[in-house]
């Protein structure tokens, strides 16, 4: 009605073609508004660059495993890995090694640097771990564990190192088991994060899993920039404290992200294929303090061979990376969801052969790029740790 009246006013009486033109103008204005209100641009991935950061055998280290990757407060990238000195197993002595990019895109990297050495006599050495960036204070933390498997040692310690200069120098390790006790806690592996939105804006959140018997998702929280830590929520495996068998409910290695409404989503490895060989998702609406069991569900679309995976929320899209197979660690695939993980809307294969643990990061803001670090090989996942820059959008 209003349109007709305005059309009549502007065109005068009886000028039908003018009125029609006016109506079309209005309609296209309306349509362009509808287009603007749509969710962000459609994901259309392509590999922009890639290179190995570590190869098995380099620097006389048997294998490199457990890739961690983060943006840094200074706008670079930081990659971390376990250098397993003599044997490939999870227990055993290791170095913690890093590489820093010289630019924001990961085109140039500094040589490897050893930042923690757990010694040569240790049976059960260090294990990674979470990188946590405190953007408010420009601090990078790496949380890791020592004597996680009780292999030749009795007491597990959860430890934390930090860098105040964008990853150039690192502090001595702080033993946070003095605050939280010596319960087995294996952070990540992947990234912790600082909450950007209420509730508990500024809080550091580091989620991980327990020991084989006391497995499940657990989160550690800090409200004072990493000085003190306390236990947040958990989703314990069943039967708790007992030997597990195939089909038991055991959420294990996990990755959390914060959504723009301040809710935390955690995506976990389904260790014994409870219900399906697919991922378990948990939520926290109170800054990680509880992970209510009634909100835990499984995502049949996200199949897995029981393996650590990457999860990232970037430009209003939820991204997931893992070996997309129910039987073998092969075919590292990126998947994305436009509705916070309710439906999964597309996938892009990064590598078709051996693929193990993966992790993702992006610089804060609206960059078209995300970065993936994953265990990659022709026949074995332990052959190398590969860095991949993925362009998600054709814009820019
Ligand atoms: C860390 O602290 C715990 C608790 O006090 C202690 O039992 C453990 O031995 C410490 N670990 C190291 C490596 O000093
Ligand atoms: C935040 O968003 C998620 C995803 O849409 C939703 O599941 C959750 O209920 C929201 N949280 C709150 C507190 O509304
Ligand atoms: C995803 O969750 C955010 C809140 O974190 C909400 O604002 C947005 O509308 C959700 N998107 C969809 C498509 O449900």
Image (cartoon, rainbow, N blue to C red):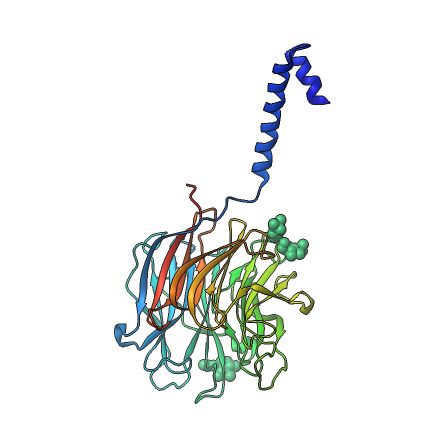
Which quadrant is home to the C terminus?
top left
Please identify the residue farthest to the top as the structure is shown: 13
Side of 72 relative to 204 (left or right)? left
- Can you say which quadrant of the picture contains the N terminus? top right
Q: Is residue 238 visible?
A: yes
Residue at the extreme right: 1
Q: Quadrant of residue 81?
A: bottom left
Q: Residue at x 54, y 75 (%)?
A: 271
113 to 22, vertically: above or below: below
When asked about the image quadrant of residue 33, the answer is top right
The location of residue 380, given as percent across then percent down, is: 35, 73
| 376 or 112: nearer the viewer | 376
x, y percent for residue 108: 29, 55
Q: Is residue 90 left or right of residue 186?
A: left
Residue 116 horizontal side relative to residue 295, left or right: left
Q: Residue at x 61, y 76 (%)?
A: 249
Residue situated in front as seen by the camera: 89 or 149:
89
């Amino acid at each position: 009605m209003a349109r007709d009246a305005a059309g009549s006013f502007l065109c005068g009486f009886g000028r039908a073609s003018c009125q029609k033109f006016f109506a079309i103008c209005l309609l296209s204005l309306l349509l362009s508004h509808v287009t603007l209100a749509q969710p962000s641009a459609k994901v259309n991935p392509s590999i922009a660059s890639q290179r190995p950061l570590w190869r098995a055998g380099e620097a006389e280290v048997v294998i490199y495993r457990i890739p961690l990757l983060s943006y840094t407060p200074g706008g670079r990238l930081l990659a971390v890995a376990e250098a397993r000195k003599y044997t490939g197993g999870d227990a055993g002595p290791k170095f913690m090694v890093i590489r820093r990019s010289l630019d924001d895109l990961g085109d140039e990297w500094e040589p490897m640097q050893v930042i923690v050495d757990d010694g040569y006599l240790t049976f059960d050495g260090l294990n990674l771990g979470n990188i946590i960036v405190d953007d408010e204070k420009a601090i990078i933390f790496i949380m890791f564990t020592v004597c996680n498997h009780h292999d030749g040692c009795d007491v597990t310690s959860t430890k934390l190192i930090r860098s105040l200069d964008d990853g150039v120098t690192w502090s001595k390790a702080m033993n946070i088991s003095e605050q939280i006790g010596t319960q087995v806690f294996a952070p990540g592996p992947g990234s912790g994060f600082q909450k950007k939105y209420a509730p508990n804006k500024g809080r550091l959140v580091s989620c991980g899993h327990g020991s084989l018997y006391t497995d499940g998702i657990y989160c550690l929280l800090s409200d004072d920039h990493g000085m003190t830590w306390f236990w947040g929520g958990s989703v314990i495996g069943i039967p708790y404290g007992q030997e597990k068998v195939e089909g038991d409910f055991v959420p294990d290695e996990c990755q959390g992200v914060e959504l723009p409404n301040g809710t935390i989503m955690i995506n976990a490895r389904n260790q014994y294929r409870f219900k399906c060989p697919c991922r378990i998702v948990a939520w926290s609406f109170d800054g990680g303090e509880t992970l209510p069991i009634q909100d835990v569900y499984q995502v049949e679309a996200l199949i897995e061979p029981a393996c650590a995976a990457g999860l990232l929320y970037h430009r209003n899209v939820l991204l997931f990376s893992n070996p997309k197979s129910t039987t073998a660690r092969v075919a590292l695939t990126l998947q994305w969801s436009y509705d916070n993980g309710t439906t999964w809307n597309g996938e892009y294969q990064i590598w078709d052969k051996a693929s193990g643990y993966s992790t993702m990061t992006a610089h804060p803001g609206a960059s078209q790029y995300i970065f993936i670090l994953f265990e990659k090989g022709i026949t074995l996942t332990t052959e190398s740790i590969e860095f991949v820059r993925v362009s998600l959008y054709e814009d820019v």
